[in-house]
Amino acid sequence: MRSNAVHRGYLVPAFAAVLTAVALAAVVFWATRSSATDDGVQGDADCDMDVDRDDALTDLRFSAGLGSFPACTARTGDADCDGQVRAADAVRALRHGAGLPPLPGRAGCPPIGARLPTPAPTPAPTATPAGTQAPTPTPGGTPSGTPVSGGYALSQIVPSAAFEASVDFAIIPGTGGQQGVVVTQDGRLHRVSLSGAFQPALFGDIADRVSYGGEEGLLSIAFSPGYETDRRVYLYYTRGSPQPSVLSRFAVAGGALDPNSETVILQVPQPFANHNGGRILFGHDGYLYLSLGDGGSGGDPEENGQDVDSLLGKLLRLDVSGQAYTAPPDNPFVGVDGRDEIYAYGLRNPWRFSVDSLTGDLWLGDVGQNAWEEVDKVVAGGNYGWDCYEGLSPFELAGCPSGGFQMPRAVYGRGDGQAVTGGYVYRGGALPELYGWYVYADFYSGKVWAVDTGSATSPAVLLADSDELIASFSELPDGELAIVSYSNGLFRLARR
């Protein structure tokens, strides 16, 4: 809004002439600019100790990502002290160079043309592999670097010798982040050591009540936020079409899940065997979130995605702190038409979603029909379009609302894969250039991408092109990501 206000309210008739002069000065500027001095002048982006039209050109090019710039640009070019060098700073430099009155500044921001103090010495940087960046994560959690396209590979941390058909993984609370449970689709759970301290061992087995095959099976696990005292574990599994999908709570005793302790929390009828969705996670708010597909078949024949009286094609938010579940009172459909359990809707097959461990934001990968896979940032009450839209493209608009959809943050077509696997916002330290980026993959192609969570439009970056069937992601206590291969165990993302 401020840049628009600057554009509309402060440009004077002389500004057009100044811009023309800026363009004519470009060649001279790049041939004659001087090197940075030890200190600087506010607004002096080219570091020649004078604020003129050349500084405006530097600011404009810097904000557009063009060319290379003096080392002091980011410090002295930020004439309005908003933490960025952009077009608004160019306007200030142009006005100063043209002798026009300065624009109002922020409190404590040095006036344009004022001498700045010498910056403190910068410590010598630590070694970083060639072709990578090592920025410091920003306090607000927004990205502070840019990952290297194609610069990463999957590094195995737990082999799959003891299990196959792996679909989910979760760290066991109270183990120092060194032990977790691998969920296999056939109904079994395996305790593993991330340090290799012991061989995988059976943690639980509910195969006797699970329908396994295709998209059905034991699909997800979540440990209670109070697990270290209440020893509660939640599982989501299918009993087989047309029987319902089941969310249940189990007790852990003697270091293993007790299959006889099951308390069924929620059952959702499934008209077809596919599109079961399939993840459960606890949010920062202590509530349990469950993603459910649209009921299956193809094209959402029962129109569940847009039907807020159906739990299919939804992300649910449940309070499971008691014996049964209740709907949190601030869920978006409480007190209005629609099921109280619904948090977001218009989903086709939300196989995997996650909670940003820093901000609590929800991110989700929704598997497409036959053209587009999509990544969504989820907001309360959001309508994510299915089956009115597949990705950004109209699918079946008859009977759909005229607007109000939350469109995807990213999409990709069949040339890059066939089934998106939602991931996590990276909050680790091993790959600081990825900090604040949402990492996700495709199950069939094995490709891994990331999108900038601080931008609504920047394109995805392809991080790795693997040979794995990537079924899920999990976040480790240190913010690093575990990648679950359907057939080859657990991996980490590492630089090549």
Image: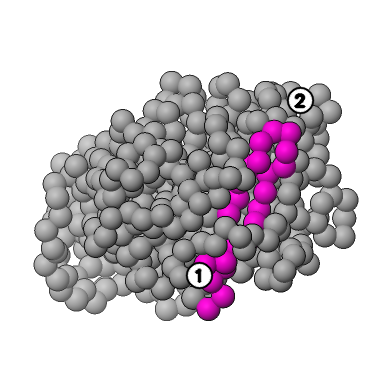
Residue 31, image x, y percentages: 15, 41
Q: How is the image coloured?
A: one colour
Query: Which comes sooner in the sequence, label 2 or label 1?
Result: 1
Amino acid tagged 1: Ala
Question: What residue do we see at 55% from left, 32% from top?
Answer: 213
Nearest to the observer: residue 464 or residue 398: 464
Nearest to the observer: residue 74 or residue 155: 155
Residue 322, which numbered label?
A: none
Q: In the rendered image, which quarter contains the N terminus?
A: bottom right
Question: What residue do we see at 56% from left, 22% from top?
Answer: 371
Element type where label 1 sits in the image: strand
Q: Is residue 81 left or right of residue 345?
A: left
Identify the magenta region: 229-253
User: Does 392 lie within the magenta span?
Assistant: no
Residue 401, image x, y percentages: 80, 35
Q: Is residue 352 left or right of residue 388?
A: left
Q: In the rendered image, which quarter contains the C terminus?
A: top left
User: Does 236 lie within the magenta span?
Assistant: yes
Of labels 2 and 1, the one closer to you: 1
Nearest to the observer: residue 446 or residue 380: 446
Whether the residues at callouts 2 and 1 have beta carbons within 8 Å, the answer is no
Q: Which residue is mark 1?
A: 253
Q: Which residue is mark 2?
A: 301
Q: Of helix, strand and loop, which mostly describes the magenta segment?
A: strand
Is the residue 4 above or below the residue 360 in the image?
A: above
Residue 352, image x, y percentages: 53, 45
Q: Rounded to the nearest whole Å, what is the CA distance between mark 2 and mark 1?
A: 44 Å
Q: Residues within 10 Å of mark 2 (few under 14, many from 20)?
A: few
Residue 482, image x, y percentages: 36, 51
Amino acid tagged 2: Pro
Q: Is residue 41 left or right of residue 304?
A: left
Element type where label 2 sits in the image: loop
